[in-house]
Image (spheres, rainbow, N blue to C red):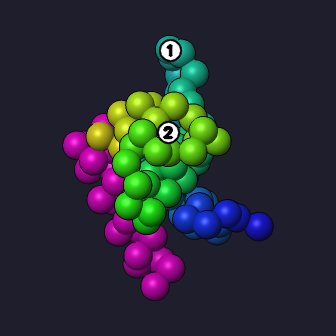
């Protein structure tokens, strides 16, 4: 069972390829599912980034990933895919 504002397994499967591409080099990234759940928690709860629960990881990491995805268009594609497939 998923917690409030978190993606269920079916929704995660729809967007996993957009936010978790295979990493070939570098330092391992934080769990993208956890980060996107943190982003949705912030957006749905209207809390500040500093109020993000610790279970999602450092607020600054979640915020930076949100900015990266927003700036490169990934977040728009995520929302579009979730809207089209789940609506």
Q: Where are the magenta residues, as a range?
A: 68-87
The answer to whether residue 40 is seen in the rendering is no
Question: How far across and how far down the image is residue 3, in percent?
Answer: 67, 63
Res. 82 image quadrant: bottom left
Asked if the stretch drawn in magenta spans residue 85, the answer is yes
User: Is 79 left, or right, of 36 in this rendering?
Assistant: left
Q: Residue at x 31, y 37 (%)?
A: 68
- Residue 40's tag is none
Give the structural element (helix, strand or loop) at label 1: loop
Residue 3 against residue 39 in the figure, above or below:
below
Residue in front for this viewpoint, 32 or 56: 56
Q: Are marks 1 and 2 in contact (CB under 8 Å)?
A: no
Callout 2 secondary element: loop
Q: Position of residue 26 (x, y in %)?
A: 50, 14
Residue at x 35%, y 69% (from the top left corner): 80
Q: CA distance from mark 1 to mark 2?
A: 13 Å
Whole-percent x and y of residue 72? 25, 43
Circle 2 crowding by C-alpha within 10 Å: few under 14, some 14–19, many from 20: few
Can you identify the residue that label 2 sits on? 21
* Residue 26: assigned label: 1
* Image point (53%, 15%), residue name: 27
Residue 51 falls left or right of residue 71: right
Judged from this view, the residue extending furthest toward the bottom is 87
- Figure label count: 2
């Amino acid at each position: 069972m998923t917690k409030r504002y978190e993606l269920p397994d079916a929704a995660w499967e729809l967007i996993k390829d957009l936010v978790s591409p295979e990493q070939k080099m570098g330092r391992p990234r934080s769990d993208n599912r956890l980060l996107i759940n943190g982003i949705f928690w912030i957006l749905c709860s209207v809390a500040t980034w500093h109020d993000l629960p610790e279970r999602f990881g450092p607020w600054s990491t979640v915020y930076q990933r949100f900015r990266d995805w927003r700036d490169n268009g990934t977040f728009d594609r995520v929302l579009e895919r979730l809207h089209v497939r789940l609506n």
